[in-house]
């Protein structure tokens, strides 16, 4: 191998290694006719790309932004937020309710379709102390008979149970600190009862020993 060819091979390897080790910059979901990305924000935190795994409470809210980009001229682009099984989420503000499809007509390639939802965990959801995914579904239609679909989880949240009520203490402490006199009375009651019981037993024993002839 001549020096020029060897030098070219070494340079090619040096440039290939960083490219192979670099993280892949891909969207959350893609197909032959388009791609879809999603970002989620909870409790006014910073936006994070899908998929995230937060911990949420009933009544807690989050924001979701979905961007669909067709790669070909389409006759229709469809999108929805989808959940399975027991209802967990509801739309507070946004272009559609959960499990309801948004439809956009003819769209040129490279045009971004952006949708923004504010979603809440149902305050009365029966699904607590478990994981609840919320999926993004998208469809890019080239014609009525030719379409590509994709789906991915925007988030997979753990729904925590409601917080227990704050500890109020026992009934005595709930009414505030008691006075020293009341504390003495409370302490004397069992002593008085025990003393009375002992005196009754002594009287009964003496009456038995004395008998009727004494």
Image: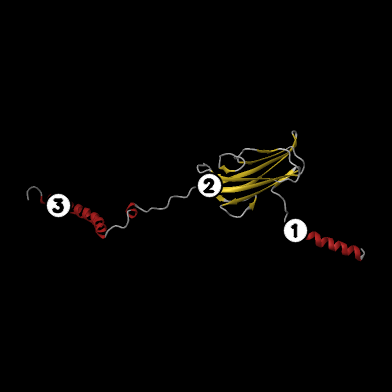
Label 1 secondary element:
helix
Q: Is residue 6 above or below residue 151?
A: below
Task: Name the mark nearer the viewer: 2 or 3.
Answer: 2
Say whether disc 2 or disc 3 marks the residue closer to the N-terminus.
2
Counting labels gives 3
**Quadrant showing the N terminus:** bottom right
- Given this view, does label 1 or label 3 mark the residue nearer the observer? 1
Residue 82 position within the rendered picture, expressed as x and y whole percent measured from the top left = 62, 41
Quadrant in which residue 31 is drawn? top right
Pointers 1 and 2 in contact (C-beta within 8 Å): no
Q: Residue furthest bottom?
A: 3
Residue 191 is situated, as x and y percent measured from the top left of the image, at: 23, 56
Splitting the image into 4 quarters, where does residue 77 fall?
top right
- In this figure, which residue is indicated by the disc labeled 1? 21
Q: Which x, y percent locates residue 127?
A: 53, 43
Can see residue 53?
Answer: no
Horizontal placement of 203 versus 133: left or right? left
Left or right of 23: which side holds 61? left
Determine the residue positioned at 68% across, 41% down: 138
Answer with mark 1 or mark 3, whichever residue precedes in sequence: 1
The tag on residue 45 is none
Give coordinates of residue 103: x percent, y percent.
67, 38
Q: Secondary structure at mark 3?
A: helix
Residue occupied by mark 2: 129
How far, Cα to Cα, is label 2 from label 3?
Answer: 64 Å
Mark 2 element type: loop
* Residue 115 at least partly seen: yes
Disc 1/disc 2 C-alpha distance (Å)? 39 Å
Residue hosting label 3: 203
Out of 151 and 106, give the one closest to the viewer: 106
Q: Is residue 61 left or right of residue 172?
A: right
Which residue is located at x 22 percent, y 54 percent?
194
């Amino acid at each position: 191998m001549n020096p020029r060819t060897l030098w070219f091979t070494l340079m090619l390897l040096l440039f290939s290694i960083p490219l192979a080790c670099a993280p892949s910059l891909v969207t959350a979901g893609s197909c032959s006719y388009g791609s879809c990305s999603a970002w989620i924000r909870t409790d006014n935190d910073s936006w994070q790309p899908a998929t995230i795994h937060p911990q949420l409470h009933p009544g807690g809210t989050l924001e979701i932004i979905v961007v669909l980009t067709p790669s070909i001229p389409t006759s229709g682009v469809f999108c929805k937020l989808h959940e399975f099984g027991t209802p967990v989420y509801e739309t507070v503000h946004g272009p559609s309710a959960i499990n309801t499809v948004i439809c956009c007509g003819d769209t040129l390639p490279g045009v971004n379709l952006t949708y923004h939802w504010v979603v809440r965990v149902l305050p009365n959801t029966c699904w607590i102390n478990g994981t609840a995914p919320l999926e993004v579904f998208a469809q890019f239609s080239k014609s009525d008979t030719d379409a590509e679909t994709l789906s991915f989880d925007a988030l997979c949240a753990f729904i925590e149970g409601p917080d227990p009520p704050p500890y109020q203490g026992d009934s005595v402490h709930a009414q505030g600190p008691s006075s020293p006199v009341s504390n003495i009375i409370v302490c004397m009651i069992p002593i008085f009862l025990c003393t009375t019981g002992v005196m009754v037993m002594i009287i009964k024993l003496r009456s038995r020993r004395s008998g009727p002839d004494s």
